[in-house]
Image (spheres, helix red, strand yellow):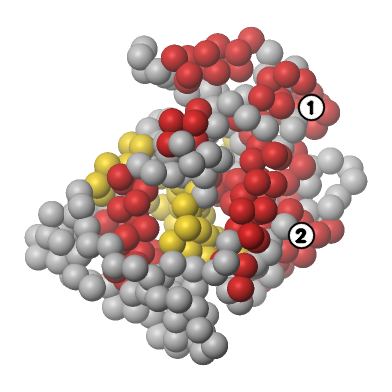
């Protein structure tokens, strides 16, 4: 399927803006699924919504690369405004439970042999939570862009007119470790300040658990991550929104000291299966140019062609070349 020449994708500060593209209906899954693309689930980021034009455009681009792809957009509410509010306000554990239940109840997703998953910003670590905690149907390849896998040490600035964001961030800066904040404010649940590590281990509602950082380890988390075919971690080269940007690669940043994933206990003791996945060639570190969520069509095309598509990828899908298209 040709992509219209006007297609341009620009993802900034958690929102995606795209021009219109063609959107044919996906083919239903049949008995012979080897040549049909696996369904793709997408979880958007902070301040965005499942119904945003740009998010839909990304799904349509995935379908253009692999015609027949069923794309499912994870949402906390069918009302787009409420879904956006849930990116700031809510309990991440409950949100992942809802995503698990919704996907398991979907008439097509629930019967698929596997699914692929695409997470933007915080949606990336939430999809990793899906893999670790339920994974039914199982994820084949998980791709994350600018996600906070090792947490954040600072909170974002909000536009003056965005009162939901401003209220949430004001509460976060007050006491990120209170039970109220940890159970109600989404970014607090992946806040991880190395200088307050003991408080983080004791009070974190989400990240300390899915990173298996506490003394009691969950063996299922490790097992599920190690079963992935691919975990593709994109970091934005000039990310100024996510602090530190290296969190996208599970790196530990403490002041000016940066510890790569492979030099951390998280990896050497294989708390969540990353070492096992790496040894079979499934752990991929990639860099995207630009600031947070500034994505080019070229990067998306190449990613979708390489990691998504039929259950048994015999050959990589050639990336369509559009006249005049390139990095945006």
Residue situated in front as seen by the camera: 57 or 127: 57
Q: Position of residue 253 (x, y in %)?
A: 60, 35
Q: Position of residue 53 (x, y in %)?
A: 30, 45
Residue contact between numbered discs 1 and 2, judged by CB atoms under 8 Å: no
| Snapshot quadrant of residue 11 | top left
Of all residues, the one furthest to the right in this rendering is: 216
Name the residue beneath numbered marker 1: 203
Q: Secondary structure at mark 2?
A: helix
Residue situated in front as seen by the camera: 264 or 325: 325
The answer to whether 51 is drawn above or below residue 279 in the figure is: above
Residue beneath the point at 43% across and 61% down:
71
Instruction: Name the image quarter holding the N terminus.
Output: bottom left
Residue situated in front as seen by the camera: 47 or 148: 47
Residue 179 seen: yes
Q: Position of residue 60 (x, y in %)?
A: 32, 60
In the visual, does 283 lie left or right of 91?
left
| Snapshot quadrant of residue 241 | top left
How would you rate the neighbour count of disc 1 (Cα within 10 Å): few for under 14, some for 14-19, many for 20 or more? some
The answer to whether 220 is drawn above or below residue 209 in the figure is: below
Q: CA distance from mark 1 to mark 2?
A: 22 Å
Residue beneath the point at 36% across and 12% down:
160
The answer to whether 108 is drawn above or below residue 151 in the figure is: below
Q: Secondary structure at mark 1?
A: helix
Residue 140 seen: no
Residue beneath the point at 89% across and 43% down:
215
- Count of numbered circles on the image: 2
| Snapshot quadrant of residue 239 | top left
Name the residue beneath numbered marker 2: 222
In the visual, does 59 lie left or right of 112?
left
Q: Position of residue 258 (x, y in %)?
A: 59, 39
Residue 240 tag number = none
- N-term-proximal mark, 1 vs 2: 1
């Amino acid at each position: 399927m040709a992509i219209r020449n006007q297609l341009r994708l620009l993802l900034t500060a958690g929102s995606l803006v795209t021009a219109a593209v063609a959107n044919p209906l996906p083919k239903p899954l049949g008995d012979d699924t080897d040549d049909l693309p696996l369904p793709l689930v997408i979880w958007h980021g902070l301040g965005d919504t499942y119904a945003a034009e740009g998010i839909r455009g990304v799904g349509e681009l995935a379908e253009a690369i692999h015609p027949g792809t069923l794309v499912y957009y994870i949402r906390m509410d069918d009302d787009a405004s409420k879904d956006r509010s849930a990116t700031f306000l809510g309990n991440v554990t409950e949100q992942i439970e809802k995503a698990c239940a919704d996907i398991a109840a979907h008439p097509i997703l629930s019967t698929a042999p596997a699914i692929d998953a695409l997470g933007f910003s915080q949606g990336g670590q939430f999809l990793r939570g899906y893999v670790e905690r339920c994974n039914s149907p199982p994820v084949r390849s998980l791709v994350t862009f600018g996600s906070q896998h090792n947490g954040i040490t600072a909170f974002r600035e909000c536009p003056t007119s965005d009162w939901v964001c401003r209220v949430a961030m004001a509460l976060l800066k007050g006491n990120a470790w209170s039970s109220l904040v940890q159970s109600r404010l989404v970014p607090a649940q992946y806040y991880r300040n190395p200088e307050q590590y003991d408080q983080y281990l004791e009070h974190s509602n989400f990240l300390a658990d899915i990173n298996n950082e506490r003394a009691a380890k969950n063996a299922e988390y490790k097992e599920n991550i190690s079963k992935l075919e691919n975990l593709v971690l994109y970091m934005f080269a000039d990310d100024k929104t996510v602090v530190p940007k290296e969190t996208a690669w599970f790196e530990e940043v403490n002041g000016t000291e940066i510890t790569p994933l492979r030099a951390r206990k998280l990896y050497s003791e294989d708390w969540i299966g990353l070492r096992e996945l790496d040894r079979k060639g499934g752990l991929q570190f990639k860099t995207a140019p630009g600031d947070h969520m500034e994505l080019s069509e070229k990067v998306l095309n190449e990613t979708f062609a390489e990691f998504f598509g039929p259950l048994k990828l015999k050959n990589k899908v050639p990336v369509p070349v559009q006249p005049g298209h390139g990095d945006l």
